Amino acid sequence: MTTRQTPLDAPAAITLRRYEPADAAAVLAHVLAIQQQEFGLPIAAADQPDLLDVPAFYQRGAGGFWVARAGDRVVGTVGLLDIGGGHGVLRKMFVAAEARGRATGVAAALLGAVQQRCREAGLHTLWLGTTEAFGAAHRFYEKQGFERIVPAALPAAFPRMAVDTRFYRQAVLAGVAGVAAAGAAC
């Protein structure tokens, strides 16, 4: 039986910070709950070695991992994987149902943290792969200036997940707060 969380009362209740080892179990449970329970994806922890060792996978080079919390509960996650050549991959962006939408700003804050890190570290292009099941996420990415691309346009170092069927990229411009120009050359 799935327990439904009540909507969050105010954006002020949300804190966003870099991942710490103490977050490991809560982050894994958060991501798996959304993947398996909400969307019925046949994916397990063993299929996601990045979540089993976040520091070794994400917190190297220009990468990072961020956690959004409402009190002691994880309500959002996002990872940035540095794949070299000025390219970063947005991964594990999962926001709990009760924390979605403009009212809380959780997704925008998570993406903003990644974009800021890209600008600070000199990454010029963000890439992401997702599944067709995440329709609301597709709309969010497109509103944020991501451009849908064909798989052949992905850089060779892009780490494809078996469930990824839809791909996006975004040019990240230095000194620009928010989103880069859509359709910019990468």
Image (cartoon, rainbow, N blue to C red):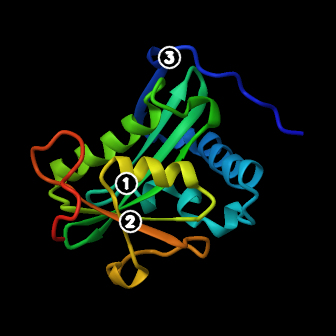
Any mark on residue 71, and which? none
Mark 1 Cα-neighbour bin, 10 Å: few <14, some 14–19, many ≥20: some
Q: Residue 59 — which label?
A: 1
Q: Amino acid at mark 3?
A: Ala
Please tell me whether mark 2 or mark 3 is closer to you in this view. Answer: 2
Which badge, 3 or 1, comes first in the chain's sequence?
3
Q: Which amino acid type corresponds to the residue marked 1 in the rendered image?
A: Gln
Q: Residue at x 64, y 43 (%)?
A: 30
Total marks placed: 3
Task: Read off the residue under disc 3.
Answer: 13
Q: CA distance from mark 2 to mark 3?
A: 31 Å
Mark 1 or 2: in front is 2
Helix, strand or loop for disc 2: strand
Q: Tag 1's secondary structure?
A: loop
Q: Position of residue 90 (x, y in %)?
A: 40, 58
Please say if 90 is above or below 101. below
Please state the horizontal and vertical placement of residue 182, each as a whole percent of the image: 23, 58
**Amino acid type shown at disc 2:** Tyr
Residue 17 percent coordinates (x, y): 40, 33
Tell me if residue 33 comes above or below residue 163 in the rendering.
Answer: above
Q: Is residue 147 above or below residue 115?
A: below
Residue identifier under label 2: 168
Answer whether labels 1 and 2 touch (C-beta < 8 Å). no
Rendered residue at 20%/60% (across/down): 123
| Among the two numbered marks 2 and 3 on one chain, the one whose residue lies closer to the N terminus | 3
Residue at 46% of width from left, 32% of height from top? 106
